[in-house]
Image: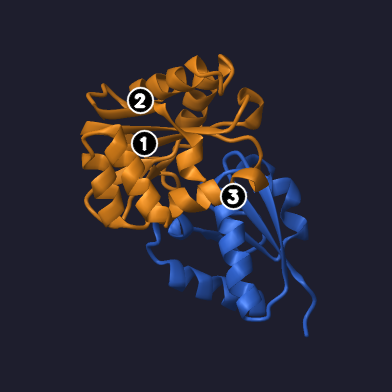
Chain colours: A orange, B blue
């Protein structure tokens, strides 16, 4: 379940990010600090994003990115979340030349496919709801984020 | 009844978005009584695995010269165009 994998210490709200790399580094650091990932995770996630970006254009005004990398950099599955005060540019997952202004970033530390299928489905269904995306992006507290996610999965 | 089709589902790591895509496709086709095997792989592995696939569905850029039908879509993540792409997948398998 997403709320179980999303560590409150790995949620950063209204972050004034410089760029996509800044967000990925910040969230990777949060996961590293809590023992979810190896030190190699941050660089691996950045390298992956540079080659196969994860920007997604969603149905509403706010877009998201779902950076992640290979299992070898992961110790325990987890998700980190950043909402951004101002959008930063990620590139589009299918058309990497296209820029996607993003305000919601889910950094995923995945162990192997089948075990996180529910969590991945949950993230996908959140992304499919412009209303939920907006609520998350504008949330002012971690409690609010948790409440929104619990309601979404109910 | 035709033989079980194989769909190669690709994404960057082979474990993340391809998981969501494969699950969605399997459920949709199962409801329609269409047997499929889905196989998840990394985008970099597609060329070597394409020979055994009837269809390739991917969330990444892919080369155009794989010799098999390729559907690039983010619909299972964003919801945008989901129904249309599921129909397209069904039609491609029936062809």
Mark found first going from the N terminus, 2 or 1: 2
Q: Is residue B87 left or right of residue A59?
A: right
Q: CA distance from mark 3 to mark 1?
A: 19 Å
* Disc 2 and disc 3 on one polypeptide chain: yes
Q: Is residue A105 left or right of residue A123?
A: left
Q: Residue at x 43, y 20 (%)?
A: A30
Q: Dot 3: few (<14), some (14–19), or many (≥20) neighbours within 10 Å?
A: many
Q: Residue at x 63, y 24 (%)?
A: A75
Q: Dot 1: few (<14), some (14–19), or many (≥20) neighbours within 10 Å?
A: many
Q: Residue at x 32, y 47 (%)?
A: A148
Query: Which residue position holds label 2?
Result: A23
Name the chain under label 3: A
Q: Nearer the viewer, mark 2 or mark 3?
A: 3
Q: Dot 2: few (<14), some (14–19), or many (≥20) neighbours within 10 Å?
A: many
Q: Which numbered disc covers residue A117?
A: 3
Q: CA distance from mark 2 to mark 3?
A: 24 Å
In the structure shown, which secondary structural element does the residue marked by tag 2 occupy? helix
Counting from the top left corner in percent of width and height, residue A73 is at 61, 23
Q: Which numbered disc covers residue B59?
A: none
Q: Is residue A64 above or below residue B2?
A: above
Residue B95 in view (yes/no): no
Name the chain under label 1: A
Q: CA distance from mark 2 to mark 1?
A: 8 Å
Q: Residue at x 80, y 76 (%)?
A: B3
Q: In the depicted view, which residue is nearer to us: B92 or A84?
A: A84
Q: Are discs 2 and 1 less than 8 Å apart at CB? A: yes
Q: Which numbered disc covers residue A105?
A: 1
Q: Are discs 2 and 3 less than 8 Å apart at CB? A: no
Mark found first going from the N terminus, 3 or 1: 1
């Amino acid at each position: 379940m997403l709320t179980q994998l999303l560590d409150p210490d790995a949620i950063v709200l209204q972050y004034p990010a410089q760029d996509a790399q800044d967000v990925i580094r910040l969230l990777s650091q949060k996961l590293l600090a809590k023992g979810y990932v190896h030190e190699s995770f941050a660089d691996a996630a950045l390298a992956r994003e540079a080659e196969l970006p994860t920007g997604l254009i969603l149905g509403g005004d706010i877009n998201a990115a779902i950076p992640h990398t290979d299992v070898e950099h992961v110790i325990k599955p987890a998700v980190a979340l950043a909402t951004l005060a101002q959008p930063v540019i990620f590139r589009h997952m299918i058309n990497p030349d296209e820029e996607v202004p993003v305000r919601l970033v889910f950094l995923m530390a995945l162990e192997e496919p089948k075990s996180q299928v529910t969590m991945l489905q949950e993230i996908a269904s959140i992304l499919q709801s412009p209303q939920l995306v907006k609520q998350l992006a504008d949330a002012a507290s971690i409690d609010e984020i948790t409440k929104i996610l619990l309601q979404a999965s109910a | 009844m035709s033989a079980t089709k194989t769909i190669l589902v690709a994404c960057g790591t082979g474990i993340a978005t391809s998981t969501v895509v494969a699950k969605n496709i399997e459920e949709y086709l199962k409801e329609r009584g269409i047997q499929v095997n889905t196989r998840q792989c990394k985008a970099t592995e597609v060329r070597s695995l394409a020979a055994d696939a009837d269809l390739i569905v991917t969330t990444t850029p892919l080369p155009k010269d794989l010799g098999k039908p390729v559907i690039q879509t983010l619909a299972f993540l964003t919801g945008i165009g989901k129904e249309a792409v599921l129909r397209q997948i069904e039609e491609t398998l029936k062809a």
